[in-house]
Amino acid sequence: MSKPVTYRFSFGPWNISEGGDPFGPDVRAAFPHDRKFALYKKLGFDGVQFHDDDVVPGLDDLKPAQIAARAKEVKKMLRDEGLTPEFVAPRLWFAHQTIDGAYTSNRAADRKYAWDRTRKCIDITRAIGSRAVVLWLAREGSYTRESKDARLAYRRLLETVDAILEYDREVEIWIEPKPNEPTDMAYVPTAGHAISLAYASRDHARVKALIETAHALLANLDPSDEMAFCLAHGKLGSVHLNDQNGLKYDQDKNFGSANLRGAFNQVRVLEEAGYGRRGEFVGLDVKTMRTQAGVPVTEHLAASRRLFLHLVEKVRTWDRARVEEYRAARDYEGLELYTLQHLMGVR
Ligand code: XLS
Ligand code: MG
């Protein structure tokens, strides 16, 4: 029996936010970006997720030497805080050039901006000591289907993946699927789409997926099945655990807060696959409620991490012999009742 995994956790600084939403302004004072990293270890987190401009703010307006200097400072900060950079994601959804997509924009100038920004992101990724670039393809999609040639868009996405693999022969690409929002429909909505892109690429071993709970639920899929699909192909780079209460805007709710049974199965699938043994982080992507007071608000991070660890215990005490009896007898009613009782702590 192999030693139980000791899970390591990560989050991105954007998870500590000011509470603004499309219908109202910030409700909390901003907590200084550079002071967020001192909170990680106290909260029980070892890994930091980054956007490229979380590492180098305003990078579009900086020279390569300035970008390199800032990345070097961040690498030192991470070392001083005992933190590991998990990944860097190019933020390709803010700039004017990415209004209609980055890699799949109809305009060549926009696609050139996207590629230039992506190369800067890869350089930043390596400079701070990470080897993973996350592609959350936020605006690679359409508001109306007729606005783009979807076949050409998919070709352009594959060309981009291949260009990244060529530009840096060691970096891994973790594609983070999401079915919509901010676009009406997105081009890589599920794990299946992401892994297909991986296998079509020039070096598929370096192309994996990052599965987010809420994104799978927005595609009306089970997050644990999406994770299991990637794990079956050795292609789960990381996860973004959170939750989602039905088909609506992306809520990034605390892990397990809307679907406790679904959270149990995500932890079960990760635990059964030995996730974490190869250094993978349990990544969170959670937003606290707009109503939460305090600066900085970190309760949602602590709660999601604790809920994960509670569910690890639930998975490890789930009576496997009893489960196998239910499975052998195809008594899934009995299995379901037992699992619910186990989660509720009742007999
Ligand atoms: C959306 C993405 C975003 C970051 C990095 O859910 O996860 O939060 O860009 O992945
Ligand atoms: Mg996410």
Image (tube, rainbow, N blue to C red):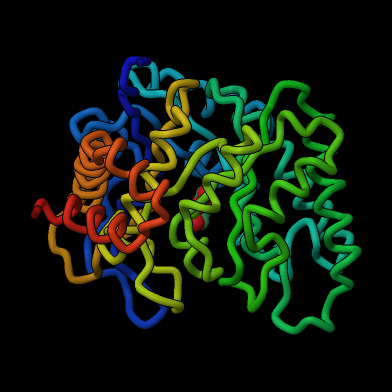
343 on left or right of 69: left
Vertical relation: 233 (above or below) 345? above
6 on left or right of 133: left
Image quarter of residue 93: bottom right
Q: Residue furthest left?
A: 346
144 or 340: nearer the viewer: 340
Residue 184 x, y percent position in the rendering: 64, 78
Image quarter of residue 245: bottom left
User: How many numbered circles does the render carry?
Assistant: 0
Residue 150 x, y percent position in the rendering: 85, 69
Q: Residue at x 24, y 60 (%)?
A: 337
Residue 97: tell me if it is visible.
Answer: no
128 or 202: nearer the viewer: 202
217 or 67: nearer the viewer: 217
239 on left or right of 315: right
Q: Residue furthest front?
A: 329
Vertical relation: 26 (above or below) 161? below
Residue 168 x, y percent position in the rendering: 76, 26
Q: Which residue is drawn at 44% across and 48% down?
A: 240
Q: Which residue is drawn at 69% across and 69% down?
A: 99
65 or 304: nearer the viewer: 304
Quadrant in which the N terminus appears: top left
Residue 225: tell me if it is visible.
Answer: yes
Q: Which residue is drawn at 74% across and 59% down?
A: 102
Vertical relation: 105 (above or below) 3? below
Residue 72 x, y percent position in the rendering: 52, 21
